[in-house]
Amino acid sequence: MTDQSETDPPRGRRARAAAAPGRAAPATSRVRMSAAQRREQLIATGRQLFAERGYEAASVEEVASRAKVSKPVVYEHFGGKEGLYAVVVDREVRSLLDRIAAALTAGHPRDLLEQAALALLDYIEEEPHGFQVLVRESPVLSPAGNFSSVMNDVAHQVEHILGAEFKSRGIDPKFAELYSQALVGMVALVGQWWREARKPKKEMVAAHLVNLAWNGLSHLEPKPTLITRPR
């Protein structure tokens, strides 16, 4: 008797093998993402691309290519590059503000300075792409959507803390806004420098920032004057 497998053409053998009990058919398609999953994938892809290239150099074509989708899918979710960029920046702004707000738990002003400095440095270390997106300037967004606006929001929180501290020390609280902008600006600029330098260690950077800020604040003159250019 002739073996049927020797006389059947290869296509017939493959068909019978696929139909044989206990054998799984070969996969012919990938699992489809839900709309929410696809949106999150595109946001993550756009975040990395905008961090690497900036808004101007990035393109919808490259977002689609990296995410392995067609361009219309990106347009469907965000309306275009500007819409995707706005979502990415909004998320980073909220993420950084939430981190800093959650860190400000201690009652003493010195502890609050330390917590704020560490919260910013933690974010820079743990979310390098997000931080890079925030510090890049973009012509398509208002000042409410960049790193400066985030630091302004933080400065307003610090202003209220300093105002109460100034009152208790006999210093005019109307200058609390000026000092809060100076303190937050110092931490922000050092943070951007540390992003590239990565030394000394994060905790040491925070300690030196607090050393300068707190020792300066603790010896404030109630009515400072200029020496080189008196009024």
Image: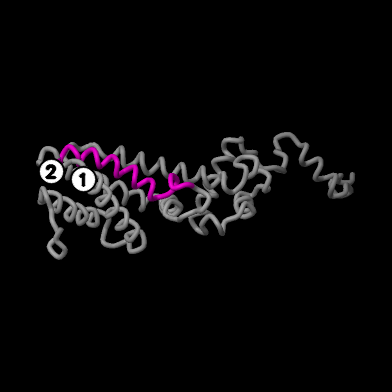
Please provide the residue range marked out in magenta: 142-166
User: From what the image shows, is residue 124 above or below residue 171?
Assistant: below
| Relative depth, front residue between 24 and 163 | 163
The residue drawn where x is 38% and y is 50% is: 148
Residue 19 located left or right of residue 170: right
Q: Which residue is mark 1?
A: 175
Residue type of the residue flagged with mark 1 = Phe
Is residue 12 found left or right of 112 in the rendered image?
A: right
- The extreme front residue here reads 231
143 in magenta: yes
Where residue 171 is drawn, which disc sits there? 2
Instruction: Give the image location of residue 51, x and y in percent.
Output: 48, 55
Viewport quadrant of the C terminus: bottom left
Binning the other alpha carbons within 10 Å of mark 1 as few (below 14), some (14 to 19) or many (20 upward) gives: few
Q: Quadrant of the N terminus?
A: top right
Please say if the residues under marks 2 and 1 sit with CB atoms less than 8 Å apart: yes
Going by the numbered disc 2, the residue's amino acid type is Ile
Q: Can residue 203 be found in the magenta stretch?
A: no
